[in-house]
Image (cartoon, helix red, strand yellow):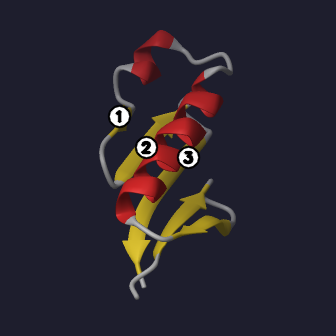
Amino acid sequence: MMKALLIHTDGYTIDVVGQYDSVEEASRNLYLEYEKMCSQEIYPEWQQQSHCDYEDAILYLNGEEVHVWQVVTA
């Protein structure tokens, strides 16, 4: 049975946010993690550069702090 992992990095560390039974479940959690970080103050010019797709996301908070997520299957 294939598992899906949600991986996150802030450029300094890499961590597994969670292990899921499907890519769909991992993608839902990817969106939730992205939205949770979006609740922080984000400079408007960096918000335009950020995106959240089905299996990956990148969030620029202020030009220096960047968060990246990716769903991978294992």
Residue carrying label 1: 51
Measured Cα–Cα span from mark 2 to mark 1: 6 Å
Measured Cα–Cα span from mark 1 to mark 3: 11 Å
User: What amino acid type is highlighted by mark number 1?
Assistant: His
Residue carrying label 2: 58
The crowding category of the residue bearing disc 1, from other C-alpha atoms within 10 Å (few below 14, some 14 to 19, many at least 20), is few
Q: Secondary structure at mark 2?
A: strand
> What residue lies at 48% left-to-right and 71% top-to-bottom?
21
Identify the mark nearer the N-term, 2 or 1: 1
Q: Position of residue 62 (x, y in %)?
A: 58, 26
> What residue lies at 68% left-to-right and 21% top-to-bottom?
40
> What residue lies at 63% left-to-right and 32% top-to-bottom?
37
Identify the mark nearer the N-term, 2 or 3: 2
Answer above or below: position of 69 versus 5.
above
Which of the pair 41/26 is nearer the observer?
A: 26
The crowding category of the residue bearing disc 3, from other C-alpha atoms within 10 Å (few below 14, some 14 to 19, many at least 20), is some
Res. 3 image quadrant: bottom left
Quadrant including the N terminus: bottom left
Q: Secondary structure at mark 3?
A: strand
Residue carrying label 3: 67
User: What amino acid type is highlighted by mark number 3?
Assistant: His
Circles 2 and 3 in contact, beta carbons < 8 Å? yes
Q: Position of residue 8 (x, y in %)?
A: 57, 59
> What residue lies at 33% left-to-right and 55% top-to-bottom?
55
Which of the pair 6/38 is nearer the observer?
A: 6
Identify the mark nearer the N-term, 1 or 3: 1
Circles 2 and 1 in contact, beta carbons < 8 Å? yes
Measured Cα–Cα span from mark 2 to mark 3: 6 Å
Q: Position of residue 72 (x, y in %)?
A: 40, 72
Q: Secondary structure at mark 1?
A: strand
The crowding category of the residue bearing disc 2, from other C-alpha atoms within 10 Å (few below 14, some 14 to 19, many at least 20), is some
User: What amino acid type is highlighted by mark number 2?
Assistant: Ile
